[in-house]
Each structure stands twice: as structure tokens, then as C-alpha cells.
Image (cartoon, rainbow, N blue to C red):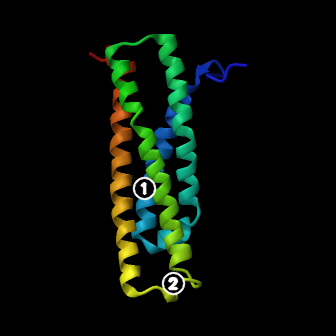
Amino acid sequence: MNFDTFAGLPLHILLVHVMVVGGPLTALAVLLHAFWPEARRRLGIVTPIAGLVILVLTPITVSAGEYLQAVLGTTPAIALHVERGLTLQPWSIALFAVALAEWAWWRVALGPAFGPRLTPVVRWGGTTIIWVAAAVIAIGFLIDIVLIGDSGARAVWGSTLH
């Protein structure tokens, strides 16, 4: 059984589409969760679950890409895409960590069981840390996935569109 293809297509190509749509949506959910209370209430546990999905799919997508690289060979454009693609795992870990932390902060730490016991300084400090982490990680993730996607698109289509 070959896990590097699906219905005759390289698995990397299919997974890339999931990452290109799901990754930015997850980053957006992290931002909304952090800064918009109504979105936070509606998103709930969905944000960390989406972060977990991206976290799990990142190494699978990279592995499928390595298979595709072995089949196609390496050109300078593919080498750049591979180099950039390897930078996504830390961002995926951080995105999931922030998604989980912000959910836990508002749901558990500021919830009815613990929230009333926290001082205003702790509440403000924790919220500020969540805001900064969410903004930095979500924006960093978005920039990285755009750079990876751009290099992949150029590797595939660069020579045909001149």
C-alpha cells in the first residue's frame, strides 16, 4: 500500500490545499479568539482543535513533499520550496500552543472556578500575554505559509508563465 499517493495523485498536492486553506483559517480563528469576545464564545474549543489538525498535518505534508521531491528530483526552485517548507513545523507547534493557551485562559483561568480568585494584575498580565502571543504567532504563521506557498507555486508554474 502506498501512502504517498491518493487516487493516483501525489498526497503532497492534496495536503497542500488543506494547509493553504486550513492554516490561515486557524490563524484567523486564533486572532478572533484572542481579540473578539463574541467570536471567542462561538469558536470555543474549535480553535485549539483546528490548531491540532494543522499541527498533525504539517509533518505529514512535509513527508509527502519529500516523497514528491524524490520522484521529481531537485531543481533550485524545489530546493527553495523544501527549505521554506521545513520552517512551518515550529510555527504549527506555536499556533496550536497559543490556540490551546487562549482557550484555557478564557475558559478555565478566567472562568467561574478560578477567575474570581485572580488579581486584576494577573488577569491583565495573562490577557496581555495571550494578545501578544496570538498576534505574533498568527501573523508569523501566515507570512510563513504565504512564502512557502509562493515558492511551491513558482516551483510548479514558474517556467510555464514566462
Quadrant of the image containing the N terminus: top right
Give me the residue at 52% from left, 11% from top: 71
| Residue, far left | 162
Q: Is 95 on the left-hand or right-hand side of 144? A: right
Q: Nearer the viewer, residue 116 or 143?
A: 116
- Residue 115 bears which disc, if any? 2
Three-letter code for the amino acid on which mark 2 is drawn:
Gly
- Which residue does the image show at 52% across and 61% down from the upper left? 100
Q: Residue at x 42, y 56 (%)?
A: 28
Answer above or below: position of 85 versus 10: below
For the point 42% across and 67% down, which residue is it?
34
Percent from the top left, x then y, of residue 112?
A: 57, 85
Percent coordinates x, y for residue 3 in the rendering: 66, 24
Sequence-earlier tag: 2 or 1: 1
C-alpha distance separating marks 2 and 1: 26 Å
What is the quadrant of the C terminus in the image? Answer: top left
Q: Which mark is residue 28?
A: 1
Q: Quadrant of residue 83?
A: top left
Where residue 146 appears, as percent x and y from the top left, is: 35, 38
Question: Can you say whether 35 is above or below 111 in the image?
Answer: above
User: Which numbered mark, 2 or 1, is in the foreground of this view?
Assistant: 2
Considering every residue shown, the one lying at the far right of the view is 1
Disc sitting over residue 87 in the figure:
none
* In-image side of 90 versus 139 (left or right): right
* Residue closest to the eye, 153 or 97: 97
Q: Name the amino acid, label 1.
A: Leu
The quadrant in which residue 125 appears is bottom left
- SS label for mark 2: helix
Within 10 Å of the Cα at label 1, are there few (<14), some (14-19), or many (20+) other Cα atoms?
A: some
Q: Are marks 2 and 1 in contact (CB under 8 Å)?
A: no
